[in-house]
Amino acid sequence: MSTTDCIFCKIIAGEIPSTRVVETDNVVAFRDISPKAPVHVLVAPRTHVPNVAAAAREIPEVLAEMAVVAQQIADAECDGEYRLIFNTGEKAGQTVFHVHGHVLGGATLGWDPA
Ligand code: 5GP
Ligand code: ZN
């Protein structure tokens, strides 16, 4: 399933360029266009689902694979120390409604939710 107006579906389909870091049959990871940390990679399933709870319900094995891919990226780029964030809903800062985990690392991360 995909949506024609979803920017991440277009990135995953290769219709919009991105810098890919890891790619599997189920998951694509690419660098965030506006990085908030020295390492900032987005891990997304090829299947369009809107948020992490929908992913847990509809594609649980792919969600688990996303966590493994996040760890692989962090192992390669920031000594396996990282934050994995799923923004859910507009007030939480979600702007793209195709589930994605933010892999953030490469620095000592603060804890300011604002
Ligand atoms: P959200 O705010 O939904 O949790 O995260 C969306 C992320 O996607 C943001 O960090 C934003 O910088 C990133 N982003 C938005 N458009 C693009 C794009 O066209 N290419 C890439 N690589 N990242 C994007
Ligand atoms: Zn999508």
Image: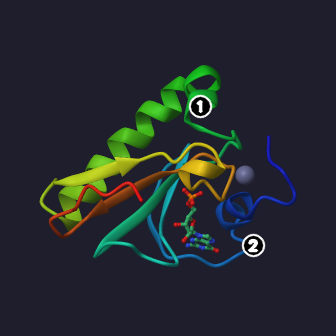
Could you tell me if residue 22 is visible in this image?
A: no
Q: Nearer the viewer, residue 35 or 89?
A: 89
Q: Are marks 2 and 1 in contact (CB under 8 Å)?
A: no
Dividing the picture into quarters, in which one does residue 26 lie?
top right
Could you tell me if residue 56 is visible in this image?
A: yes
Which circle, 2 or 1, is nearer the viewer? 1
Residue type at tag 1: Ala
Q: Where is residue 6 drawn, in percent x and y? A: 78, 58
The residue singled out by tag 1 in the image is: 55
Instruction: Examine the rendered structure and indicate whether residue 71 appears above or below residue 37.
Output: above
Q: Where is residue 64 drawn, in percent x and y? A: 42, 31
Q: Residue furthest top?
A: 57
Instruction: Examine the rendered structure and indicate whether residue 30 appears above or below residue 33.
Output: above
Q: For disc 1, does the CB lie below 8 Å from ligand 2?
A: no
Residue appearing at x 59%, y 31% in the figure: 55
Label 2: how many residues lie within 10 Å, few (<14), some (14-19) or many (20+)? Answer: few
Instruction: Examine the rendered structure and indicate whether residue 46 appears above or below residue 35.
Output: above
Relative to residue 51, is residue 63 drawn left or right? left
Q: For disc 2, does the CB lie below 8 Å from ligand 1?
A: no
Specify the color scheme.
Answer: rainbow
The residue singled out by tag 2 in the image is: 15
For mark 1, give the secondary structure.
helix
Residue type at tag 2: Glu
